[in-house]
Each structure stands twice: as C-alpha cells, then as structure tokens.
Image: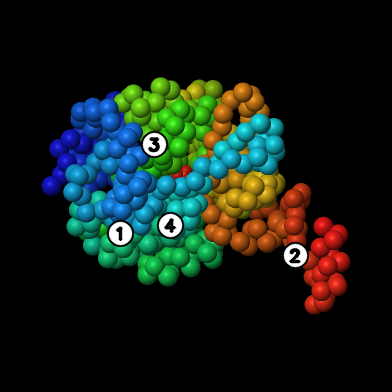
Amino acid sequence: MSNPLYLQRCISAECCAEFDLDARLYVCSRCGGLLDIERREEIATDSLREIWLTRRASFDSRDRSGVWRFREFLPFPEDADVVSLGEGNTPLYDAPRSADYCRLPQLKLKHQGCNPTGSFKDTGMTVAVTQARKLGARLVVCASTGNTAASLAAYAARASLQCAIIVPAGQVSHAKLAQALDYGAKVLEIDGNFDASMSVIRELAEDESIYLVNSINPFRIEGQKTVAFELAEQLEWSVPDHLVLPGRNLGNSSAFGKGFRELLKSGLIDRQPKITVVQAEGAAPFARFYSDEEHSEFVNEEHPKTLASAIKIGAPVSWQKAWRAVHETGGSVITVTEQEIADAKAVIGRDGIGCEPASATTVAGIRKLGINENESVVALLTGHVLKDTDYVIKYHNQSLTDPDERRLESRFANAPIRVAASADAIRDRIYKM
Ligand code: F0G
C-alpha cells in the first residue's frame, strides 16, 4: 500500500503538479519537470535524535543501515520490506595534510567510498531498489559511468531482480565493470558517451515493467539525502560553514540540498551549510551556468572531457534541483583542472584516505576557493581509491596524461623502486628514505 503521508510533486513553480507516491514516474507527466517526494505533514522530531542514536547499537538490519536508521524521513511504512546491504554510517575523518594543502587549520572528509560497493550511490540505491520491488518491477536499469552500475547490480542481486546496465564502451574503469559483472548484471556497452546511454535508457523505461534508477528517480534522492542527517549527527547537530562535493549528473548535490532543507524545516539544525559543487574544467556546464550572471540558459557540454571518468557527463539531468541547493544556501560552483585533481588526490592519499579522481575535485576546489580559516569545511569523497587504480599507478609512475594527451606533472609522485633481492640492498634503500 502506498504511504498516504507522502506524494510526488513537480518542482517547477509554474506547474507544481502532484502525483501519488507510487505513480511510476521519473519526471512530471504534465510538464516534464523534475519530481520531489514530499511529506504532507510535519514530522514530530522531539525524541528523534535519541532514537536515531540508539539504533546504532541495535542488530535490526534497518537500524544497522545508515539510511534506514533515519526512516522517519523516508516515504515508506514502518514495516517496509527493505533491500539493504548495511549502507551508510561512513566515517568523517580529520585530514590534516589535506587541510594544510588547502591552507586551512582543519578539514574534514566524509568518506562515502566506504559504502558496500565503494561509492555514495549505495545510499540512494537501497531506497530506489526497495521501491522497484514494491512496484513489482521485473527489470531494473540504469545508464552509468560505472559506480551507479556497480551499486545497482549489487542491490538488484540482493532483491532477486533482473538488472541491465548501459555503459559507454571502453570508458568505464575495470574495477567498476568487474563489480557489475560479478553481481550478475547484464552489462550492455554502447558506442557513445554517458549522455547517449542516458537518453537510450529513458526511452526504454517507458515500458511499465522496467524501472529506471538513475538519480532522476526521486527515490534515489531520498536515500542520498540521509547523508546530510548522518553528517549533522556526526557533528553533534551543528553543521559546517561549507559542504563541498563533486557534481556531474547533480543528483548528489540535489540530495544534500533536500536533506539540509528538511533538517532545517524540522528544527533539527539551525542553519544550512553553503553547498559548493566542483566540476572538472573539461566537463563543466553547471559551472558555466553559475558564472553567467543572468543564469538564463543551461547549455549542455557536447564533448565532455576529463580523466575523472565518473564525472564525465555533459547533460546533467538534475541541474535545476542542484541549482536550488546552491542558490538557497549561498554556495557556489567552481571548476578545477586535471592537474589540480591529480595532485589533490595524491595529497588526500597522504592522509591515509584513498579516493577516486572525481572525489579529489573537492580538495582541489577548496584550495582554490580560499576559504577563511575561521570557517569549518567538510568535503565529500564520493568513491574509493580502488575504483580506478590505473589512474593512481600512472600518476605515481609519472605517466598520467590529460584527455588531450598532455603529460601531467606528478608533484607528489611515489613510484615503486626496483631493488635487488638482498637484505643489504633493501636496507640501503630504506635508510635513504
Ligand atoms: N563522484 C563519483 C565517484 C561518481 O561516480 C559520480 C557520478 C559523481 C561523483 C557525481 O555525482 O552525478 O550525483 O553529481 N557517477 C555516476 C555513475 C554518473 O554513473 O556512476 P552526481
């Protein structure tokens, strides 16, 4: 049974059409606008902080999940049959070397790469696949640069649902592809980039038995918004001055905007952090939209280029929601170069925290933003270092080239050293360190 407390509403101010929670829609059927899931009544929040904290010590599988722990804010009944892999509850690290690199006294990194399939996608996928099963879908599908694919494949396997994934041939890292294959998804490689994969998949999803779980799906956003709850809880219900995250399809920026908005509305926090989105210079339509003073027209990037393959997208589907988040929190949208991403990634590594290139846009961006040292900053790392090891090895071997084949400098290179198989030779090298 659908939860009568919730509905889907078009975000377009001129339309605001409302739909039943379980209407199988991805965009507004009246005007094509994006959809938000909304609650009809306010939530009583008196003892919620204590309830959420108590659940951390429980063995109930919903309580063990960092997403379903906050289920009072999710559009499902209390007894919902959830599909979970114990996602969320990711660490919030102090990162002194990265802070130093950004000329800040302190910097915290929220590592979403510590999710079950190694990226932030799991926090949304648990909710979207739970909804897919509730709707009786036969097949779940997505277009992906790799992380959504890996995540969907895993959750579909848990839910015993068939799963098909469309990826741009030759443009997905081996690690991400390997995950999707191992979890049993049908991986369909097309000639064309992510944006082409996305338009094919939207056409396919017109079939009622197929359920699309890209971040245009508002249930994905519901799951991902809970990371704002978890972060606020980890900071003892104060929020940082700035939250910085990478942006591509812009689902995650939208989700943080929604999460913090709901927390503020319900009185669980007293202000929102400024949300800043960082894009790679060669794939930055949102940054261009932001810099245009009129903010009048969103122009897609036809040929997006970046080595950070996870964020190589030119036509972000959720830009209006992300714009709402940036605008209402007083944040910004900036770009960083391939060189800046590569160096920032290596610096994050020196803090003992591994992330994928897309995630390192955050630290590169914070360095560039020149944030006042009295202000607190949290950067979101979206994927694990093992997601793209080719990039890491090339960087440290000083052979990383940008998409135009220009050699990048490896300012923090740490190449392996060839040494004779003798204790003396090894001792000799160690003492030189
Ligand atoms: N970081 C990583 C590691 C990602 O995989 C993605 C998106 C993003 C950031 C951007 O997030 O789209 O919500 O703005 N990856 C998608 C995928 C597109 O198919 O895995 P966004």
What amino acid does circle 3 point to?
Phe
What amino acid does circle 1 point to?
Val
Q: Which of marks 4 and 2 precedes in the sequence?
A: 4
Is the shortest distance between ligand 1 and the CB of mark 3 under 8 Å?
A: no
Residue at the disc numbered 1: 140
Tags 2 and 4 touching, CB below 8 Å? no
Residue at the disc numbered 4: 116
Tag 1's secondary structure? strand
Taking the spot 84% from the left edge, 65% from the top edge, the residue there is 429
| Number of residues whose C-alpha sits closer than 10 Å to that of mark 4, classed few (under 14), some (14–19) or many (20 or more) | some
Q: Which of marks 3 and 1 precedes in the sequence?
A: 1
Residue at the disc numbered 2: 416
Res 284 visible? no
Q: Is residue 149 left or right of residue 77?
A: right
Tags 1 and 3 touching, CB below 8 Å? no
**Is 165 in front, or is 328?**
328
Residue at the disc numbered 3: 229
Q: CA distance from mark 2 to mark 4?
A: 30 Å
State which quadrant residue 256 falls in.
top left
Q: Which of marks 3 and 2 precedes in the sequence?
A: 3
State which quadrant residue 255 falls in.
top left
